[in-house]
Image (cartoon, rainbow, N blue to C red):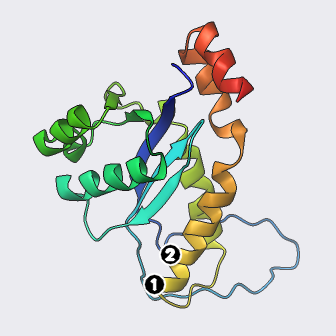
């Protein structure tokens, strides 16, 4: 990968207010205040190793939505060749998505089936869900703001993708990625 190539990891997630991913251990049994209204945000993100990461929200996860995510990511990384690692969700393989990628200097690298652990962004989703679970979310806008802020903060941490780069890229490319 050259300095003109940006490596990214794409995935979607739907954090919601009714999920209980926060676990607490306490002697005092502190009172927990939780919004019981179900609010869900269909969230897409691309975690960029050496470029600009994005997070965006869509109503659905259809091929048109994936296409818009790719367009937004391309705008965030102008003039760069994009390599995007993603899972095998049906919309990720859609003809429309593949055609757009082929015509816009984007290489899609699909992970093997049933291997979410190979996508570093999955760990970011886990942390975001935990944070949403511990937050009293007032409305949809508050939820999306909470998710976006958490993603932007977590995307800055190399620890999410560093081991992946060392494991799956050749030493030559890994050292380039790690030195940027």
In front: 23, or 151? 151
Neighbourhood count class around disc 2 (C-alpha, 10 Å): few under 14, some 14–19, many 20 upward: many
Vertical placement of residue 27 versus 98, above or below: below
**Picture layout, residue 111 above or below residue 86:** above
- Where is residue 166 shown, x and y percent of the image? 64, 18
- For residue 93, say whether it is visible: yes
Which quadrant is home to the C terminus?
A: top right
Q: Which residue is mark 1?
A: 140
Callout 1: SS = helix
Q: Position of residue 62 (x, y in %)?
A: 19, 57
Residue most toward the right?
27
Report x, y in % for residue 143: 52, 78
Q: Residue furthest left?
A: 95
Asked if residue 127 lies left or right of residue 40, the reply is: right
Residue sitting at 54 percent across and 54 percent down? 125
Q: Is residue 157 left or right of residue 146?
A: right
Q: Mark 2 = which residue?
A: 144
Q: Residues within 10 Å of mark 1 (few under 14, many from 20)?
A: some
* Residue 21 seen in this snapshot: no
Q: In the image, residue 20 lies at what x, y percent?
A: 56, 69
The residue sitting at the front extreme is: 79
SS under mark 2: helix
**Residue located 70% across and 38% down the image:** 158
CB under 8 Å between discs 1 and 2: yes
Task: Identify which residue is drawn at 21% across, 35% down.
Answer: 103
The residue closer to the viewer here, 169 or 137, is 169
- How many labels, in total? 2
Q: CA distance from mark 1 to mark 2?
A: 6 Å
Say which mark, if any, is on residue 25. Answer: none
């Amino acid at each position: 990968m050259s300095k003109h190539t940006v490596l990214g990891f794409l995935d979607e997630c739907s954090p919601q207010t009714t999920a209980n991913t926060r676990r607490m251990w306490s002697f005092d049994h502190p009172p927990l205040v939780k919004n019981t209204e179900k609010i869900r945000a269909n969230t897409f993100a691309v975690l960029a190793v050496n470029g600009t990461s994005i997070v965006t929200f869509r109503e659905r996860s259809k091929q048109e939505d994936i296409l818009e995510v790719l367009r937004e990511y391309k705008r965030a990384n102008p003039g760069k060749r994009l390599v995007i690692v993603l899972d095998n969700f049906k919309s990720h393989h859609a003809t429309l998505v593949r055609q757009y990628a082929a015509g816009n200097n984007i290489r899609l690298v699909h992970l093997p089936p049933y291997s979410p652990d190979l996508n570093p962004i999955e760990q970011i989703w886990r942390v975001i869900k935990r944070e949403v679970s511990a937050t009293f979310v007032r409305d949809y806008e508050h939820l999306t703001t909470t998710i976006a802020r958490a993603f932007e903060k977590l995307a800055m941490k190399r620890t999410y993708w560093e081991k992946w780069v060392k494991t799956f890229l050749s030493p030559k490319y890994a050292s380039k990625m790690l030195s940027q």
